[in-house]
Amino acid sequence: MINFNGTLISPEDSKLSTNNRGYKYGDALFETLKVVNGKIFFWEDHYFRLMASMRILRMDIPMNFTMEFLEAEIQKTLKANDLINASARVRLNVDRGEGGKYLPTDTAQVNFNIVAEPHSNPFYTIKTNVSYKVDLYKDYYMAPGLLSGLKSNNKAIQVIGSIYANENDFDNCLVLNTNKNVIEALNGNLFLVKVDKIKTPPLEDGCLKGVMRKQILEILAKDVNLFIEEASISPFELQKADELFITNVIQGIIPITQYRKKKYGNEFAQKVVTKLNAKLRLT
């Protein structure tokens, strides 16, 4: 069952109008949530990122879009799909409704819809001895700036980059901005490990303001023996790193095992995953 503006409907009855602004112009935002036994991981961070993104896009946020209201709608959707006592992947989508061309009309009203599906692993784990090869995606570049970091429905680079990766037998690709700095992977933020120095691109470079990125930075900041830096990463730094890993809320941490001829370990990533799971147990 799909939750459309609070009404549960079957997928067969779910019909998106061709006048929907999310469909016509990508005038929409979304959050991808991991939920285990009804607990939404990092819900507060997801909610405030969504609200901040809606303000940046100058959407009129409905008065009832409180954190409690949207959480209740997510729980309702999980129950309708028999996923309240299971591990689930949930997508919460908001769009500006219908009306207008590029300029929305005064009658355009924000919609939301929620889709839930089963997810296999309730815990964050790292599979050892599993190859994960990446390369740079250089056909198109992201513009630096906070607008590029919104989780909007405009994902052309991620789509064609994923097709490129699949055609060339890569598991993922790393995205560059117009300054030719590495900003992220196609499906998550990037971290670089070199001895005791941990580096991740700054939001100003155009990377996603990832919820898992925030969790990892908070975990790392507690270790006084580490030097954490949010700074631009050039492609030349990748082959000098001891480890590279990708972060997102659904998978947690994904160690990169190979970039071109350079191979990487995952010892540091394993330690961070352990701390991440411990953090979840305490919250």
Image (cartoon, rainbow, N blue to C red):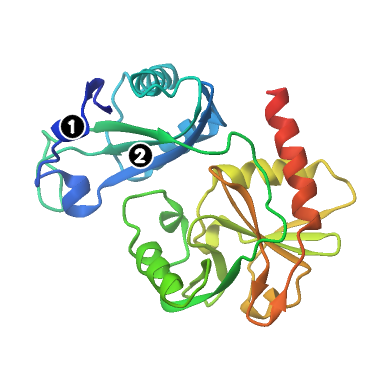
Identify which residue, 90 or 62, lies in the foreground. 90
Element type at mark 1: loop
Where is mark 2, residue-wise? 54
Q: Residue at x 62, y 78 (%)?
A: 235
- Choose the circle earlier in sequence order: 1 or 2: 2
Instruction: Tell me the amino acid under the disc marked 1.
Output: Gln
For the C terminus, which image quadrant? top right
Where is mark 1, residue-wise? 109
Q: Where residue 187 sits: x, y (%)?
A: 49, 56
Question: Is 190 placed above or below 122 here?
Answer: below
- In screen coordinates, is 67 left or right of 243? left
Mark 2, Cα crowd under 10 Å, few <14 / some 14-19 / many 20+, is many
Q: Residue at x 44, y 40 (%)?
A: 32
Question: Is 85 placed above or below 110 here?
Answer: above
Element type at mark 2: helix
For the N terminus, which image quadrant? top left
Per the model, the C-alpha gap separating discs 1 and 2 is 13 Å
Residue lying at the far right of the rendered structure:
225
Q: Residue at x 75, y 71 (%)?
A: 241
Q: Quadrant of residue 216?
A: top right
Q: Where residue 242 sits: x, y (%)?
A: 79, 68
Instruction: Tell me the amino acid under the disc marked 2.
Output: Met
Q: Where residue 38 sits: x, y (%)?
A: 50, 21
Q: Where residue 67 sits: x, y (%)?
A: 44, 22
- In screen coordinates, is 158 left or right of 248? left
